[in-house]
Image (spheres, rainbow, N blue to C red):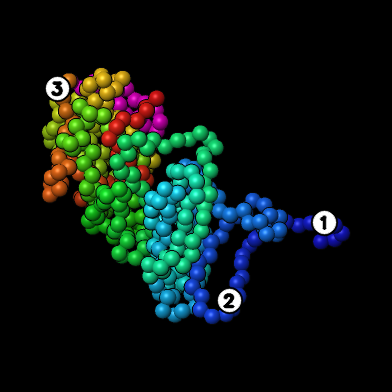
């Protein structure tokens, strides 16, 4: 540049020269807010914001030929020690991707404070990074009281090794997949878990179990962020808890969600296929000492409260027993085995308490 003119640009690429002995390491790319602070030696460090999705590009290198085909596992620990597996990749796949970078690490921090990001090879930590997470600047808070289970496809990839590919679990609950090919049309696609062309799953969580006693204890909430697609039959069921024929049931077809009590009181939410929708199914207990809305059933669709219904004081929502682990009655079934419709699950949360719907 001529005279005292200055030119600034984002870094287009890095070129590394490895010297010395054996080296096995990971690299992460992060855009720092203040270049000057790096120049003077005060590295600002990795930062994130609560309830804002973080995306971190990364790479892997090993001078040891035996480790160039190892398995890379990324783990994230909150300040309280809760562990989340972010991604697992075969190192040889990463090495082979010379024309593109590996899928980024993605996660949504729900707590503030310092997170510890670890990279492991053969169960050994090879790198550790600290991510400082600040409180959400927009005042967003996630409902965590009474949270029983939270599952999502965020940050997952169909390129994971087989030993972790089929693991979709949280807080002791897990999904058993059937006929899931884990390819471009099913499995972990675009931060969702996609059930398509006859792929199904069953989660061993029973939101309406006898022990929970929704109608007489604290109520409950099942929150589903999803999208139906590839529909051949509008009545095809893609999500189900309980029997469709009789008794209490929560189910989703390609265009509607239905909650039904034992005596037949129903709530219905309608939506379009191929459009993402988030629905919270909220059931209050029948005891006025436990809630301000006794015997009320509500649906909240994309943040909008739909008209509710009142169930009878003698009614119930009990489906199965948690203690009966050999029975699938009351478990969460996802997908359509006949392949007549597909569903993408972005988030699935279960609470053993009602959430504030106002």
Residue 198 percent across, percent down from the top left: 24, 53
Query: Which disc, if any, is residue 100?
Result: none
Query: Residue visible at 52% across and 40% down?
Result: 135
On the rendered structure, is 103 left or right of 211? right
On the rendered structure, is 170 left or right of 135? left
In front of the other: 326 or 235: 326
In front of the other: 81 or 265: 81
Quadrant in the picture for the C terminus:
top left
| Label 3 sits on residue | 314
Query: In the structure shown, which secondary structural element does the residue marked by tag 1 occupy?
Result: loop
Q: Earlier in the sequence, mark 1 or mark 3?
A: 1
* Residue 254 placement: quadrant: top left
| Label 1 sits on residue | 5
Q: Earlier in the sequence, mark 1 or mark 2?
A: 1
| Label 2 sits on residue | 18
Query: Residue visible at 68% across and 54% down?
Result: 37
Quadrant in the picture for the N terminus:
bottom right
Q: Earlier in the sequence, mark 2 or mark 3?
A: 2
Mark count: 3
* Residue 87 placement: quadrant: bottom left
Closer to the camera: disc 1 or disc 2?
Answer: 2
Number of residues whose C-alpha sits closer than 10 Å to that of mark 1, classed few (under 14), some (14–19) or many (20 or more) = few
Residue 159 percent across, percent down from the top left: 38, 63
Residue 118 percent across, percent down from the top left: 45, 60
* Residue 137 placement: quadrant: top right
In front of the other: 33 or 92: 33
* Label 1 close to label 3 by CB (< 8 Å): no
Magenta stretch bounds: 295-312
In front of the other: 147 or 17: 147
């Amino acid at each position: 540049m001529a005279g005292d003119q200055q030119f600034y640009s984002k870094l287009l690429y890095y070129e590394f020269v490895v010297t010395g002995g054996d080296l096995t390491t990971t690299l992460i790319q992060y855009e720092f807010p203040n270049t000057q602070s790096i120049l003077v030696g005060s590295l600002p460090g990795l930062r994130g914001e609560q309830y804002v999705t973080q995306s971190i590009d990364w790479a892997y290198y090993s001078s040891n030929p035996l480790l160039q085909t190892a398995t890379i596992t990324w783990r994230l620990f909150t300040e309280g020690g809760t562990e989340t597996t972010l991604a697992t990749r075969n190192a040889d796949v990463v090495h082979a991707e010379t024309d593109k970078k590996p899928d980024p690490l993605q996660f949504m921090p729900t707590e503030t404070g310092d997170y510890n990001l670890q990279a492991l090879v053969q169960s050994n930590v090879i790198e550790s990074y600290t991510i400082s997470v600040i409180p959400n600047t927009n005042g967003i808070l996630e409902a965590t009281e009474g949270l029983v289970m939270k599952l999502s496809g965020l940050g997952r990839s169909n390129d994971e090794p087989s030993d972790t590919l089929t693991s979709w679990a949280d807080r002791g609950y897990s999904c058993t997949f059937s006929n899931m090919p884990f390819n471009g049309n099913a499995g972990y696609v675009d931060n969702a878990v996609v059930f398509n062309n006859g792929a199904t799953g069953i989660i061993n969580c029973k939101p309406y179990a006898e022990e929970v006693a929704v109608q007489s204890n604290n109520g409950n909430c099942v929150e589903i962020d999803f999208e139906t697609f590839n529909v051949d039959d509008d009545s095809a069921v893609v999500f189900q808890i309980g029997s469709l024929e009789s008794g209490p049931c929560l189910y989703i077809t390609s265009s509607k969600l239905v909650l039904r009590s034992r005596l037949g009181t129903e709530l219905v939410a309608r939506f379009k296929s191929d459009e993402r929708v988030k629905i919270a199914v909220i059931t209050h207990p029948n005891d006025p000492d436990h809630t301000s809305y006794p015997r009320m059933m509500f649906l909240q669709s994309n943040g909008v409260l739909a008209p509710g219904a009142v169930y009878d004081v003698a009614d119930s929502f009990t489906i199965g027993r948690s203690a009966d682990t050999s029975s699938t009655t009351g478990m969460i079934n996802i997908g359509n085995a006949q392949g007549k419709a597909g569903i993408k699950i972005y988030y699935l949360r279960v609470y053993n308490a009602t959430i504030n719907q106002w």
